[in-house]
Image (cartoon, grey):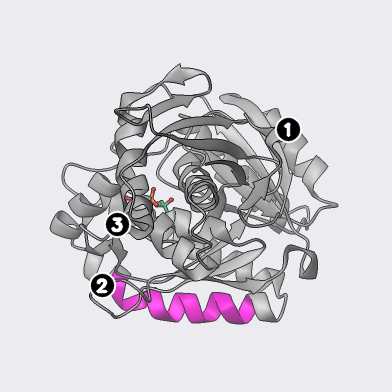
Amino acid sequence: MDATAQAQPNIALVKYWGKRDTRLNLPVTGSLSITLDALWTRTRVEFDALLRHDELRLNGAEDPATLARASACLDLLRRRAGTALRARIDTRNNFPTAAGLASSASGFAALVVAADAALGLGLDRRTLSMLARQGSGSAARSLFGGFVGMAAGQRDDGADAVAQPLLDAAAWPLAVVVAVTSDRRKHVGSGAGMERSRRTSPFYPAWLDSAAADLAAAQRAVQARDFAALAELSEHNCLKMHAVMQSSRPPLLYWNGATVDCMQRIRALREDAGEQVFFTVDAGAQVKAVCTPDAAPRVAAALAELSGVEQVLSSRLGEGARLLDDSEAP
Ligand code: DP6
């Protein structure tokens, strides 16, 4: 009754920022993302009749906050399996966990895939995506590789609020350079931040009104492999989300000075040096530069020399969550 799975974080180009139901974690708009390759979460889940509570180790250390969320997610799978067995969860990230790099997306995607196999449920990808969504909205997308679309869905039970693959990683091989900027401040988490924006930002209604058009335009750009169109749309959608965040009360200002410097440098690389590159930023200070693979070393070098950039990570696009051999357990 044990299994090991791997999932990679995904980066949204059309963002999810707002829920229509907080209990089932239903997004109010659809979103579109790319799944990374080089960053991963590996998780082993073992159900054990001797355990009285779930246990979790993240990078070798106990983590009560993550354990509570993981337990709630496992409850969904236990209910389907008709078991009350508790589990030992061992999970590891090969990238900085607290740095706002979507560790909850890869974390919940790996958890549902491992728990499904450990319980012998054999659930389909759509169902696994739905279960991962209840752990963290963005995790629904990490079930799939390459370019992924996430539907807001219309049903009250959330059965249609699931992700689906749009285009394989190999069909349009792009690269992502992540600039990790120094940022010591504690931020409001995504879920709480979205609720604050919904209640207080005067721009929230406009954000919702324009979401479907942004999503359709991004899907067209992906299908046409139109880099310039995807770049313009993604930067617009990202800055629009941050305008909603920043106009919330109290404001959600996730950027630091280096975040802005990275965005300016990326724009200069595109507009002055002709590189195929654009930026996106999530609920944190890190900047993700999406570019063609040939541009990636130059983009990485340009960002690494900015003061305030602590680390630069490079990745290609990768596969969805999958099972691993026991030999690859964390
Ligand atoms: C800014 O998926 O972390 O990265 O559903 O509350 O766990 P919860 O939120 P989460 O939010 C991600 C927000 C975002 C945009 C995105 O990934 O679409």
Q: Secondary structure at mark 3?
A: helix
For mark 3, what is the residue? 244
Q: Secondary structure at mark 1?
A: helix
Q: Main secondary structure of the magenta part?
A: helix
Question: Do the CB atoms of the residues marked 2 and 1 lie less than 8 Å apart?
Answer: no
Of tags 2 and 3, the one toward the viewer is: 2
State which tag comes first along the sequence, 2 or 3: 2
Q: Is residue 214 magenta?
A: yes
As rendered, which of 243 and 7 lies closer to the eye? 7
Instruction: Examine the image and state in which quarter residue 66 appears.
Output: top left
For mark 1, what is the residue? 327
Compute the Cα span from label 2 to label 3: 28 Å
For mark 2, what is the residue? 157
Q: Which residues are magenta?
A: 208-221
Of all residues, the one furthest to the front in this rendering is 49
Q: Is residue 146 above or below residue 167?
A: above
Q: How many marks?
A: 3
Residue 16 as seen in the image, left or right of residue 304 = left
| Callout 3 amino acid | Val
Residue 79: x and y, percent? 31, 55
Q: Is residue 99 above or below residue 81?
A: above
- Residue 206 is marked as none
Please tell me which residue is depicted at 57% across the width and 78% down the height of the picture: 219
Please tell me which residue is depicted at 30% across the width and 51% down the height of the picture: 245
Of all residues, the one furthest to the right in this rendering is 294
Residue 151: x and y, percent? 42, 74
